[in-house]
Every structure is written in C-alpha cells, then in structure tokens.
C-alpha cells in the first residue's frame, strides 16, 4: 500500500530531490536496488531534472507534488491512496497523474481517490462512496454518486447565486463586476424546453463594446454551450462607470441533454479583453423534458439539437 496524503510527507527539506527519492522510496517500502532501477523513470515523470540536486526546501509546492507522486506511482502498490494533493499541481501534470492512476487501475490494482473534483472522480473511478460527517451517504457507480452529490448541493437547486463577494483571478472584476445570476425559468432546467436567466452587473470604470454571457461545461471543464448578448445582433454597448445593468437571456429550446453541468459566467470588452469571469460558478441539473427521447438520458450525451432530416428512398441508385 502507498499513499499520497499531504505535500512533502516523508521528505527531508535539507536533502536534495535526488536524496529524497531514495529516502521517500525507502519509507514507502522500496529497496535501494528497486529505486535505482526506476530512478530514471521517476525523474522523467516528475519533470524536475534541472533541480534534482537542489534541496527540496527551495521547491515550490507544485514541485513537491511532482516528486512525491512520481515516487509513489512507481512503487507499483496493490493499493494507492490519493487525497486532494493533486489540486496543487498544474493542469498538465494533473492530467498526467490521472493517466498514471488509470494505468494502475487497469493493471488490476486499486486506487482509492479522495477528492472534491467531481470531473476527476467520474473519469477515473468506477465506483464511488459519498461520505458526509464521517458516514456513508450512498455508494454505487461513480457517475451516479457524483450526480446524486451535486444535485443534493444547494447550489444545484438555488435559483439565485450571488457573485459580488467572490474572489476573482487577476484583474477580473476590476472594471465591471457581475453581482448576481438568477434563473427566471426555475430549476431544474429541462431539455428541449424554454429557459431564461438574468445577470446583474455593475460598471466600475468606463468600458466600451461590452458583452456578457453564460456558459455550460461538462464536469471535466469542457465548454459545451455558450449564450452571449452580442452573438446574434452584435450589440456591444459602451457603459459608463457607477451604473448598474441587467442582461436577460431567453432561450426557446435548451439543447443540453439531461445531466449535471457546471455554469460559467463572464463579460468582455470587444473580442478578447476579459472584464469579469467566474468559471465553475455553480452546478446545474438539466432534467428530461416532455419531448426528451429516453436513449439520450446517459452520461456524455452532451448537446442534442433539432434539425430538418429526411429519409429518402435510394433504390434507384
């Protein structure tokens, strides 16, 4: 059994990365010969070769994670326990780690993955256990447990989400700040039926060519659908500071298949200058509508759009 529970556990800050590979490997139960045999693979996986002979006390938390995971992953344990530690690494390394864990699980070994990253849980795990206050709430196929967990969340049922006090990255929210998202059509949303929403925002500095939008993404973060105020008619007003505004969205037919999605909201000036952006603001449930065919009620159905289709007799060809 091997575990990755906290950044730097089993590392000595005064020792170099090279020395800590041997130290940490020994703590995890690897023999010196085994560490030497896998040393090159560990260094290549961690991608810190340039700093291999630098004391780890000078490493960033991301470098710690890279080295710690690389050692644990090459132990080839029967059971690998991984906590939220991967949240520290960058997106590319997280993807690499998830791929390694999938490789471990496909090899007949067990990965116990503890995380609030529902996209990672649903893509990596076959079975899920939902814990609350130390007690099991529900167990079953991972996707079903993720959906149950997210739909139980108040955010997935709240018609109004206040955003003015949320932290932004970089300069987002400095010139224009979105303060509130409200679903006017009620929740859950329904596939194939009309929906409407409202975004309230305040202009803090004069801005030109303004548009605002709402996006729907998968739990893994892939954007599927976006509604923007300037898409159809190119309306991009110039707005003056110290004024509150409201954008209302009305969609006659929601084309998202039933499932759980994350909602992103944002605003920009012109084609590329971001004014405000809140990715993954909340989760939203899309339920079956009156015209929803049963075959699309499955994970990964994504966007299903109506179209004019005909079946023609091709016997003459």
Image: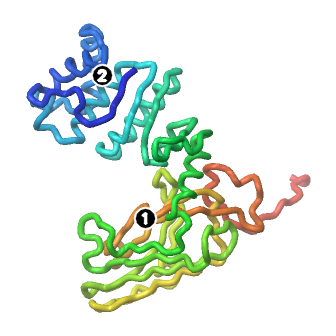
Q: Position of residue 213 (x, y in %)?
A: 45, 74
Q: Is residue 122 left or right of residue 113?
A: right
* Label 1 sits on residue: 281
Q: Residue at x 57, y 35 (%)?
A: 126
Crowdedness near tag 2: few (<14), some (14–19) or many (≥20) residues, C-alpha within 10 Å: some
Q: Position of residue 287 (x, y in %)?
A: 66, 62
Q: In this rendering, which labeled residue sits more in front, label 1 or label 2?
A: 1
Alpha carbon distance from label 1 to label 2: 39 Å
Task: Compare residues 97 and 30 and report the one nearer the observer.
Answer: 30
Label 1: element kind: strand
* Label 2 sits on residue: 41
Compared to 217, does 274 lie above or below? Answer: below
Q: Is residue 38 left or right of residue 219?
A: left
Q: Residue at x 31, y 30 (%)?
A: 69
Q: Residue at x 61, y 46 (%)?
A: 144
Q: Quadrant of residue 194?
A: bottom right
Task: Compare residues 103 and 148 and report the one nearer the observer.
Answer: 148
């Amino acid at each position: 059994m091997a575990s990755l529970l906290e950044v730097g556990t089993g590392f000595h800050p005064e020792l170099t990365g090279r020395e800590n590979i041997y130290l940490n490997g020994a703590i995890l139960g690897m023999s010196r010969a085994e560490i030497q045999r896998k040393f090159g693979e560990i260094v290549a996986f961690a991608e810190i070769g340039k700093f291999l002979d630098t004391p780890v006390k000078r490493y960033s938390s991301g470098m710690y994670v890279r080295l710690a995971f690389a050692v644990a992953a090459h132990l080839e344990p029967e059971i690998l326990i991984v906590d939220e530690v991967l949240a520290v690494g960058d997106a590319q390394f997280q993807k690499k780690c998830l791929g390694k864990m999938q490789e471990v699980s496909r090899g007949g070994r067990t990965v116990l993955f503890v995380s609030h990253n529902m996209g990672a849980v649903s893509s990596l795990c076959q079975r899920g256990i939902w814990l609350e206050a130390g007690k099991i709430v529900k167990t079953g196929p991972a996707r079903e447990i993720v959906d149950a967990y997210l739909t139980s969340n108040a955010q997935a049922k709240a018609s109004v989400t206040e955003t003015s006090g949320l932290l932004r990255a970089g300069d987002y929210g400095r010139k224009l700040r979105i303060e509130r998202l409200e679903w006017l059509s009620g929740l859950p949303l329904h596939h194939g039926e009309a929906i409407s929403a409202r975004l309230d925002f305040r202009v803090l500095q004069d801005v030109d060519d303004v548009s605002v939008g709402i996006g729907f993404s998968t739990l893994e973060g892939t954007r599927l659908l976006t509604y923007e105020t300037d898409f159809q008619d190119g309306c991009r007003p110039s707005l003056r500071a110290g004024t509150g505004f409201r954008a209302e969205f009305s969609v006659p037919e929601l084309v998202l298949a039933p499932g759980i999605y994350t909602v992103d909201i944002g605003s920009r000036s012109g084609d590329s200058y971001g004014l405000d952006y809140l990715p993954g603001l909340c989760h939203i449930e899309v339920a079956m509508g009156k015209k929803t065919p049963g075959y699309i009620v499955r994970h990964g159905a994504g966007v299903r759009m109506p179209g004019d289709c005909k079946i023609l007799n091709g016997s003459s060809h």
